[in-house]
Structure formats: structure tokens, C-alpha cells
Amino acid sequence: MIGCYLRDLNFEKEIGANGLLLEVGAFRFVVDVGMDPKRVGNSALPQLDLLPKNSVDAILLTHCHLDHVGGLPVLLRQQSQARVFLSYPTSLITPIMLENSYTVMCRQKEEQSIPEYPLYEKKDIERIKQSFLPVKFGQAQHLEKEGCNLDITFYLAGHVLGASSILIEYGGQRIFITGDILFQDQHTLKGANIPSDRYFDTIVLETTRGRTERKSNRANEEERLLKTIAHTIQRGGICLIPAFALGRIQELLVLLYNARRMDKIPECPIFCSGLGMALVNVFNEIGKTTNTVHFSRKILKQLNVKPLRRKKIGPDSQLTTPAIYLLSSGMLVEHTPSYRVASSLIRDCKNTVCFVGYCDPDTPGGQLLQTSPDEVFTFKALEFSTPLRAQVEHFDLSGHADRDDLYQFVVDRQPKQVILTHGDAESRQWFLEKFSKNCPPIRILDPEVGKTYVL
Ligand SMILES: [Zn+2]
Ligand SMILES: [Zn+2]
């Protein structure tokens, strides 16, 4: 029997340009093809040149975050015969994410002189849709090639709308890829739904939160966020919530809507950024046709949400106050709406910045979190410095499973082996030590970049 092989196509052991080459029997799959937001140019993509032209049978997409789909148009240019298996919501949202990424690359080309940007053209985004094969959750897809038969099944993975875990069954072997996963329900999404009676030989495990110990549960964190918002509005301040446009913003809108109905936060305008608003429509559409998301755009009206129209907001802008600004990006990346609005509000102690997700320490958001009160903070892209007077808070409302939940998931399934992905070195180390100490029969693999492993 022909075996199964795995190779990590990322440049480093980190969360960045996710991409996994899986050779299963006669099939050659690529699972996810991301773009690393911290790198520029071609080096932001996985090592796609390792794949001979037209050698990939199928691309399996776990979900539409850019660290999983950002390089898809480039890969499909090289592998035009490959079919793309993905969930229906992912098929709708991925083109929107890529269009946004295209716009960002065009801007970066000018500002940072990156000659190879954009890495694809707008017409490529249209073209890739023809390769999409949306699959239903829980329904096995049977594939056959050169007498080799296998089944692929997508399962609901929580995390973000359309997020999937993927099971590949071949010759009695079951390979389960968690993708980015969250077991708990969110306001807008159900948690992961993996049949509890399924056995897996191999689990390819995301490890994002391996170095993060949960200190407070989700409900408590939400209460703390609402109290912080209420205090800020009551003292006449602005509350900026930097959040990912996809998922987080819609989730927070529902949280704010429920809080308003229970009088937990005072009346005030809520401003929301462009991409977040565009995705609200997609959430609404998908909500009408499937039961995978609980969101209706009616709440925008009831909350009186307004789009943030002024493009050139900067340090001297007069913002509406008191108000809530729910804006992307979640990490306050330079030039984004949240970055610009932050530049005009952090010098006033009435205001608050509420981070609600992970912030990479190298991003402006990560740097602001490390800034002490009254210390000077510099908005480099705006050439503006100011002492930090606003309140800065961080709330643990992550879309990724806690490390203990992932550990328990593996213990319950008792696979033969676990392959660690999607986490920095420290996060993988936690899992490596925990499994090695407590589950000695399970083989733990932290794959070296560039090395092929037999499964
Ligand atoms: Zn993700
Ligand atoms: Zn990810």
C-alpha cells in the first residue's frame, strides 16, 4: 500500500503562512495556503515552489482567515487543475477577504516599495471561484484516482463562520485536521461539532493558545468588557474596540445588542468599519440559508450602527463623543481604521481602548498593551507621538480553543500520533511536554520545516 506523508510548507514554526502538503496514497493535497501578515512579498507565502507545477489534486481550506487563504490565487495559478474543497460559508467569504488583501497589497506596494505586490490580480480572484467545490458539514466526499479511494469529511469547527475540521480516511487510516477550532458556542456561532465516537489515528492539532493559561472564563470576560464600556460612556469618553472584521465584529455587535436590551450599556452612537459592515451582509445572507450562524442585520438598525465614513482620520480629528468605535484591525495594524482612531484618542484619560483578541507583540496593538500610563507612544505611520493617558484593557475572548480543551480532546480520542501546527515555539513546547509526560504511547511530532514525515 502507498503510504501517507506530511510536510509543513510554512517558512517557520509559527502562525503565518499556513500550508501543509499531505500525500495520501495517489493523492497530493495542500491543506490551507495562507499569507503571513508579518512578512512581505513572496516570502509571505508558504514554500509553493516545492510543488511541481500541476501536481496538486486538491486544496482543502479549513477557513477564510488570511493566514489560511491569502496565497490561494497564487497557488491556483501554479496548480490550475486543483479543485478546492471548502465549506459553503468559506466559499462566500474567501473572495471578500482576498479582495481586501489585494487592496492592502496595492497600498503597500506604493508605501513600502514592494515590487512583487500585488501577488495576484483582481481577475484571479474571480477565476478561483470556478475551482471551488463547497461541501456540506458531516457528508463524506468520495475521491478516486489510479485505483486509490479515499473519503474527505468536513466538520463544524467553531472559531469563525465556515471554519472546518477535516477528516481524511484512506486504507483504514484516519487523519483528522482540527484547523483553527473552538469547542465553546459563541453568540453568533455554534462550537465545534466533531462526532464523539470517531477514532482518529492521526490528529493534526492547532496549538495557538499553548502558552496562554486561561485566567477567567468567557462570560466573566464579557461582563468585564461591558462594564468597562459603560464606565467609559458614562464619563463622556470614547471606547475603541479594535477587532477582526470577520467574526469578531459581528460577535461583538450581538454582545452589544444583548447588553443594550438589558440596559448594561448606555445609549450612544456605535461606529463600525467598512469591511466589518460588508461582512455583516454575508453573515446575514448565510444566516438565512443555513443554520451555521445566528446573526441578523436587523440588529444594526436597532443598535443605530453607523459606518465610519471619514477616511483620513488622524491625530487631530474631532471624533463623536461619547461613542463606541468597533473597528478593524484587531491588532491596530498601521493605516487601518482602528489605528487611525486610536491616534486621536489615547491622549485623553476619558477614553478607553479595549482589545478583545490576541495581539502579536510586534504589532502597534501589542506595543500599546506594553506601554505604561503616561509613557510616550508613537504612531510611526502617522509620524505622531503622544503620552498614553487613555485606559488600555485586554479581554480574553479568543476564537481559539484553550490549551486544556485541546489537550482533553486528544486524550479522549487516544490517537496514535499528534502533529503540532499553528502555534509559536513556546506554544508547541507546552503541548509537547504535556503529552510526553502524561500520554507516553501517543507519538508527538513537532514537524521541522522542510522535512517530510511518514504518517
Ligand atoms: Zn483563523
Ligand atoms: Zn489561523
Image (cartoon, rainbow, N blue to C red):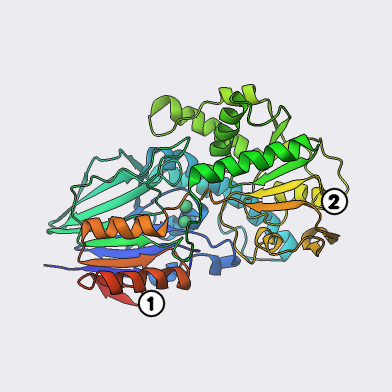
Q: Which mark, by number, is residue 315? A: 2
**Image vertical order of residue 455 relative to residue 321, above or below:** below
Q: Which residue lies at the image location 51% right of the left edge and 53% below the top edge? A: 66
The quarter of the rendered structure image containing the C terminus is bottom left
Are the residues tagged 2 and 1 within 8 Å (C-beta)? no
Mark 1: few, some, or many residues within 10 Å (few <14, many ≥20)?
Answer: some
Up the image or down, 360 lies above or below 245; here it is: below
Please report the residue visible at 59 percent of the width from the left and 51 percent of the height from the top.
101
> Distance between the Cα atoms at labels 2 and 1?
45 Å
Instruction: Give the residue type that dot 1 points to.
Output: Glu
First in residue order: circle 2 vs circle 1:
2
> Residue 112 falls in which quadrant of the image?
bottom right
Confirm whether residue 12 shows in the render.
no
Between 408 and 66, the one lying in front of the other is 408
The tally of labels here is 2
The front one of 68 and 148 is: 68
Task: Give coordinates of residue 146: x percent, y percent.
Answer: 15, 58
Hey, which quadrant is residue 404 in on the image? Answer: bottom left
Q: Nearer the viewer, residue 222 or 80?
A: 222
Q: Which mark is residue 122?
A: none
Within 10 angstroms of label 2, few (less than 14), some, or many (20 or more) residues?
many
Decide if residue 442 is in sight here.
Answer: yes
Left or right of 365 on screen, residue 373: right
Residue 177 x %, y %: 31, 56
Residue 189 is situated, as x and y percent measured from the top left of the image, at 43, 37
Q: Is mark 2 within 8 Å of ligand 1?
A: no
Q: Which residue is mark 1?
A: 448
Give the residue drawn at x 48%, y 69%: 424
The residue closer to the viewer here, 416 or 353, is 353
| Tag 2 secondary structure | loop
Q: Amino acid at mark 2?
A: Pro
